[in-house]
Image (tube, grey):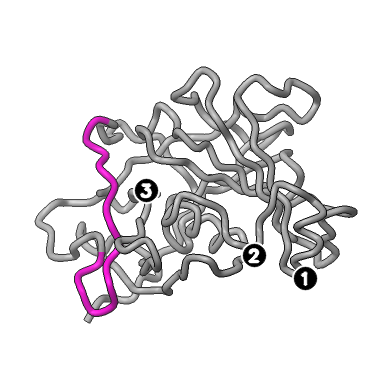
Amino acid sequence: MKKIAALLLLTPLLCACLEDPSSSASSSSSSAGEEPPLSSSSSSEYEDVPFRVAPQLSEDGRSADIYSYSVEDGVLEERYELTLEKGESYVDFQEVALYYLAFGEAPANYFRDKGLASAYGEEGRYMQSFRLGDYDGPNSYTESLGSFNESRGTYLELDIDVDGHYRPSGNRGAGRLVIVVDGIKDYGEDPVVYQTEDHYDSFSEFYNYPGGWSDPFDGTGHGLGARKAVPTYQ
């Protein structure tokens, strides 16, 4: 039986053991009852520090089993958390992030048209797509997320309701999930996901598993410090 993962990984540390991006092949998720993406029986020694894992992909394109992770005595331990279903609606930061990483698209309740999002109903959400350099106004934050792999790399903004008053065509609130589609230079070509609850003033980086979020770092605001890269455990 898998050990229960109880470690909350909060303060990101700069680590000299960042994985070589050329070796960052994405791991696949597994069906219930099969071995999870990472094996706790591995002989590799893992550091008990903040870390990320490769995105947990859907194996059959229809569903994705999601695991959380912790390090116990140098061994990476997994715990099954939930199964995501393609074509379903998801609304919170974590599940929307995991859905995108698993299926390479936003959940079914996200639309690039505010009217369609409103017509979907209570869970309808608006999303936008940008290219690096499209915007340089007061809410420009992309430089705080790390160096994009592509000079005109695509990034997405997906609305997240943080106060219970969200309306796609009205008050969209301050919650956003930001996804750098082609990744950043620290980690290779996998998408990298961030959340902001204060309209880009600060961000947290997602480490690709439930509970795996960095401490907040500066976006357009100041005082929290810059983002720090962490090692990727495969």
Instruction: Give the residue pinned by disc 1.
Output: 122
| Amino acid at the residue labelled 3 | Phe
Where does residue 156 sit, x and y in percent of width and height? 61, 40
Q: Disc 1 or 3, which lies upstream in sequence?
A: 3
- Which residue is depicted at the point 75% across and 60% down? 162
Q: Which mark is residue 91?
A: 2
Q: Disc 2 or 3, which lies upstream in sequence?
A: 3
Instruction: Give the residue pinned by disc 3.
Output: 51
Q: Disc 1 or 2, which lies upstream in sequence?
A: 2
Foreground residue among 132 and 17: 132
User: Of discs 1 and 3, which sits in the foreground?
Assistant: 1
- Which residue is depicted at the point 65% across and 62% down? 109
The quarter of the rendered structure image containing the N terminus is bottom left
| Amino acid at the residue labelled 1 | Glu
Which region shows up in magenta? 22-36
User: Of discs 2 and 3, which sits in the foreground?
Assistant: 2
User: Of discs 1 and 2, which sits in the foreground?
Assistant: 1
**Marks 1 and 3, how far apart at CA:** 35 Å
**Marks 2 and 3, how far apart at CA:** 25 Å
**77, above or below 194, in the image:** below
**50, above or below 67, in the image:** above
Classify mark 2: residues with Cα within 10 Å, few (<14), some (14-19) or many (20+): some
| Amino acid at the residue labelled 2 | Val
Q: Residue furthest left?
A: 43
Secondary structure under tag 3 reads loop
Count the marks: how many? 3
